[in-house]
């Protein structure tokens, strides 16, 4: 398994990443403790955190944030500026007034099925499952599961079409 992307680019923070073959990572990215499958393309200004997993032949466009607990299957398109959220009640401090730590919140995993498309500017909330070949409209806020092949859009995202 490769320990670095297939291309050279300046200004990347890459630490403890499992790369598949022929992964391309552009400049100004932060990747740490994640897995990235064969042939995937990661655009500039993307952050993928520890515990996230990206499948093969995916495209992650610029300015997207993929946090701990997100699993993206093969062949998924993630548009520009997509944000994943993994906590329903984020707080800076705990009940004792101390800076919150890993023990002070519940990780809510997100699963994105094979062949799904997530439009630019979408927000995917924690605990959501997006089905295979689903389409999430640009700017949508996904707060509940999306069925295989469904098209959703809006705030909150609502079913527009089922294939």
Image: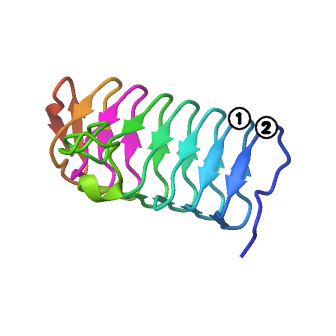
Q: Are marks 1 and 2 in contact (CB under 8 Å)?
A: yes
User: Residue 98: x and y, percent?
Assistant: 30, 43
Q: Residue at x 26, y 37 (%)?
A: 91
State the SS at label 1.
loop
Say whether residue 97 is left or right of residue 48.
left
Q: At numbered mark 2, what does the secondary structure look like: helix, strand or loop?
A: loop
Closer to us: 163 or 131? 131
According to the picture, the residue beneath numbered tag 1 turns out to be 28
| Residue at 18% in and 31% down | 157
- Which of disc 2 and disc 1 is earlier in sequence? 2
> Which residue bears the numbered disc 2?
11
- Is 49 above or below relative to 16? above
Residue drawn at x 73%, y 40% is 26
In the depicted structure, whether residue 93 falls above or below residue 76: above
Q: Label 1 to label 2, Cα distance in Å?
A: 5 Å
Mark number for residue 83? Answer: none
Residue pictured at 71% horizontal, 76% vertical: 1
């Amino acid at each position: 398994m490769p320990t670095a992307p297939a291309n050279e680019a300046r200004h990347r923070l890459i630490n403890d990443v499992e790369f598949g073959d022929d992964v391309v990572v552009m400049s100004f990215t932060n990747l740490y403790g994640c897995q990235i499958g064969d042939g995937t393309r990661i655009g500039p200004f993307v952050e993928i955190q520890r515990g996230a997993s990206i499948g093969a032949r995916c495209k992650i466009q610029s300015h997207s944030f993929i946090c701990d607990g997100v699993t993206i299957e093969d062949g998924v398109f993630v548009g520009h500026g997509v944000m994943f959220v993994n906590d329903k009640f984020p707080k800076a401090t705990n009940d004792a007034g101390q800076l919150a730590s890993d023990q002070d919140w519940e990780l809510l995993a997100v699963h994105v099925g094979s062949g799904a498309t997530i439009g630019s500017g979408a927000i995917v909330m924690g605990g959501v499952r997006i089905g295979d070949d689903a389409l999430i409209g640009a700017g949508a806020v996904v707060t509940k599961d999306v069925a295989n092949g469904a098209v959703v859009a809006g705030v909150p995202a609502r079913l527009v079409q089922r294939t």
